Structures are given as C-alpha cells and as structure tokens.
Image (cartoon, grey):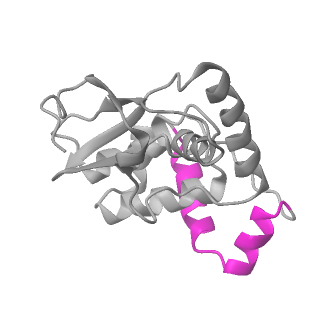
Amino acid sequence: MRFQDLGKRGVLQNLDPLIIQEDSGWNERKEGPALDAHVATLMGSIKAQGVLEPLTVYMRGDDVVLTNGHCRLLAVQRLIAQGEQIEFVPCRVEPKTANDADRVLSMLTRNSGKPLEPLEMAAVMKRLLAFGWDEAKIATNTGFTTVYVAALLKLNSAPEEIKGMITRGEVARSEERRV
C-alpha cells in the first residue's frame, strides 16, 4: 500500500489500524501492571470517543511503521480483539527527512501520555548514544540536566537484579530532571 502524501510534514491520514506495523524492541515501555492500567484507561476513552491524539507513522517501502502511539495502538488492538469495530485511526505522517535518531529523541520529548519510567528513559538515552550523541546533546535536546542524563545512563548499566527491583517498586528512583 502506498500513500502519496506520506512524508509531507503535518499530513494526517486515517489508516486501518491492522496495517500499522511495530518494530520489535522499538518501544521501551516495560510490560506490567502500570502499563496495563494505562492501556485499560485508554481503551475506555477510545471506546467512548475514538482515538483523539494521532499516532505517528512513516513509510518504509510499502510498510506503515509506528513510531509514536504504541499504547494507543495497543488499546485499539485490544478493543478490536474484544469485537469493537475500529476501521480507522488518525495518523500523523513524519517528514521524509526524519531519521531514527529523530524518532528515538521523540520518545523523550513528545510523550504526552503515560510518562516513561526512569529505566525506560535510560534505555532511550542509551540508544541516542548509539547515534553518536553525547550526554550534553541529549540534555540540550530533552530539557533534562546533564546530571540527570548521566544518572539515567548509569542506571541503565545497573545489574538486572537492581533494575527488576526498581520496576517492581521495591527501590525508588528519583533525580531532578529539568534544567
């Protein structure tokens, strides 16, 4: 399937949610009770009002690939599995000039739904490092302090046992994050 206007900034398309693909491992959200509760809340809202905030997609060949709106899409998928008729969801098309670094950064800066947990932010920041970004560039582009960025990157390298304790809420993780 080809969409002529995909790639023009700001173009909205109503797309069949069943054609939208997700790259495995792209979304840094961790499965668990907090995410399930958030998706359940979205399901109620979507059932009552539809998808109000557009998903963000781009074309990769003939595939429509999701970059923002994973929880909304999951809520739609669960509603469809329950028998709800949802034929289209609004999608904002990324400009053709967008690249993977832009998409990864947007996980931190455009996330207006459930905020990323510290471990999720840490994983996103590690991905930005892989694009050649340094801590200062991440801080500048996210509005976080360099101290917070460094702390999250250090957290990302913590043993899995510690990360598990944080995810389960057995150990608190908080730092000042804004400049």
Extreme-left residue of the structure: 4
Residue at x 35% of width, y 47% of height:
19
Q: Is residue 21 above or below residue 88?
A: below
Regarding residue 147, the answer to whether it shows in the image is: yes
Residue at x 27% of width, y 22% of height:
10
Q: Is residue 1 above or below residue 134?
A: above
Please say whether residue 152 is one of the residues in the magenta stretch.
Answer: yes
Please say whether residue 159 is one of the residues in the magenta stretch.
Answer: yes
In x, y percent, where is residue 31? 67, 60
Q: Is residue 106 above or below residue 104?
A: above
| The quarter of the displayed image where residue 6 is located | top left
| The quarter of the displayed image where residue 22 is located | bottom left
In x, y percent, where is residue 179? 55, 34
Label count reads 0
In x, y percent, where is residue 77? 55, 46
Q: Nearer the viewer, residue 167 or 4?
A: 4
Residue at x 66% of width, y 34% of height:
42
Q: Is residue 50 above or below residue 80?
A: above
Q: Main secondary structure of the magenta part?
A: helix
147 vs 159, left or right, is left
Residue at x 49% of width, y 56% of height:
27
152 vs 127, left or right, is right
Regarding residue 137, the answer to whether it shows in the image is: no
| The quarter of the displayed image where residue 48 is located | top right
Q: Nearer the viewer, residue 132 or 12?
A: 12
162 vs 21, left or right, is right
In x, y percent, where is residue 24? 43, 65
The quarter in which the N terminus is drawn is top left
Question: In the image, which residues are magenta?
Answer: 144-169
